[in-house]
Amino acid sequence: MSLIKNVAQQARRTNVVASKASSSGVYPLGGYNENKAQLRRETTAQYYRDHDIHHAAKKDSVRLKAAALLFTGRIPSNIDLIRSAQYLQSELPVRIAHRIKGFRSLPFIVVTNPHILKVMEQYIRSFKVISNFNDGRMVKTQDKVDDFTHLLEILLDEHGSVIDDLTQGFSSCHDHILEIFDGDEEKTHDLVQSFLDKTLTSRLGIRLLAQHHLLLKDQIGQNSRDRIGIVESRWKPAKDIEAIARKIRESWMFHCDNPPRVKLNGHTEAEFPYIPIGVDYILQEVFKNAFRAVIEAHANSARQMPPIDVTIAVNREDFTIRIADRGKGMKSDVIDKIWRYHFTTARGRQGYGGVGDLLSMANSNEKELAGYGIGLPISKAYAEYLGGKLEIKSMSGIGTDVYLTLKHIDPHKGHSFRI
Ligand code: ADP
Ligand code: MG
């Protein structure tokens, strides 16, 4: 978690430096910030005639084994960083072009929604600045790698609101899509689900790679035993679980004097190499739901709320985290819909975070507790992208068990997943 924050803070810092420097004309990013307005004007027109995007979208993406990130070198060197920049220079435009193609295949009424159009234009602009960087030639010198790294920081920051924009966009388009499908809810749901699953997991992959590069840069020449880029060499699930549970519990304290406690058991001492960014996101969402369920179910009881029990099981090929709450579970009509984007039973409730705030949120997942109906579907898509699964078993009237199972990244323990 701290990792995500660090990168975000770093990105913001650099963004300020970059924009100041570029407006005074000294910052060598090809005047990225100055040219933004012009790029915006160009992108929509370009969308229809850009052969580069079309060409790049035909190439296959080169997905790295997660373990490959771990073994690029125990002590990251300048050569590693140049290689990493070159890989990103050729790989990111391909991935972004695939996503632009995804936007192109959406019905017209959806693409013209201002939120969705904004994201598509962001992707087109990013495609353009990355492919044109260094006049399209691979970076070879330290200076150029530094410039490229700054560019990545700026782009990461700029794409920070994509999830909010897309969910807002699709939420307001729902009725139009339904109309296209003659009122068929299933077809409407399939279109939204396949687009958002693909776009958001691809975005996760791109961000992991970019953040890996940024962190590697900070570690050059250091023999870091704890971390190589985004990979923590000795990740301890119990530690992240405790930190996330504490944070979410504190957030719920605005709504409840004494939210339930979280109790850990199982392999609480286990440590292994892992990339925590995705799993931290999923845990946050699952904890937000578990706390909400327990708090709402026991709001009128004077007794202490039943704890949320977390069990960790670490095995050779994978590990499972089970989060079990006594929040009275879900009825079958709710269970059937929980994996759908925008399904929520919290809409209209006060104070959990309202759709009106959506655009002002820099990092929605930390600030809102419920109400958008995107926590579970995104978490499931992320878990599957990371070679795992997210499952829910609920006993109506009693409580809910969430099982998150993920594969190890260590190649000695069987197959890993690809980023
Ligand atoms: P949100 O939290 O914004 O409503 P989610 O996708 O996280 O969206 O969850 C969707 C719905 O699933 C929730 O509104 C709630 O009805 C149900 N749900 C999820 N987790 C639990 C749980 N642990 N106990 C009871 N209901 C749950
Ligand atoms: Mg939720």
Image: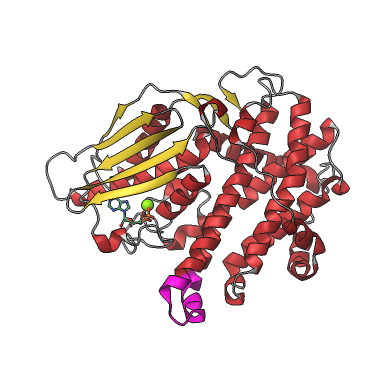
Q: Is residue 203 left or right of residue 332?
A: right
Lateral position of residue 187 relative to residue 217, left or right: left
Residue 183 versus residue 350: which sits nearer the camera?
A: 183
Check if residue 184 falls in the magenta segment: yes
Looking at the image, residue 37 lies above or below residue 188: above
As drawn, 128 above or below 260: below
Residue 414 lies, in percent from the top left, at 52, 31
The picture quadrant where one finds residue 137 is top right
Q: Answer yes or no: is residue 277 visible.
A: yes
Residue closest to the eye, 6 or 189: 189
Asked if residue 140 lies left or right of residue 338, the reply is right
Q: Quadrant of residue 56?
A: bottom right
Frontmost residue, 324 versus 157 = 324
Horizontal relation, residue 291 to residue 40: left or right: left
Which quadrant does the C terminus fall into?
A: top right
Magenta residues, dominant SS class: helix
Q: Residue at x 66, y 68 (%)?
A: 104
Q: 80 and 167: which one is in front?
A: 80
Q: Residue at x 35, y 42 (%)?
A: 403
Horizontal and vertical percent for residue 48? 76, 71
Q: How many marks?
A: 0
Q: Position of residue 55 (x, y in %)?
A: 79, 59
Q: Report the coloring of the rendering.
A: secondary structure
Q: Residue furthest front?
A: 414
**Residue 162 visible at all:** no
Q: Which residues are magenta?
A: 172-188
Q: Position of residue 200 (x, y in %)?
A: 55, 53
Q: Quadrant of residue 88?
A: top right
Look at the image and say whether residue 304 sits in the magenta stretch: no
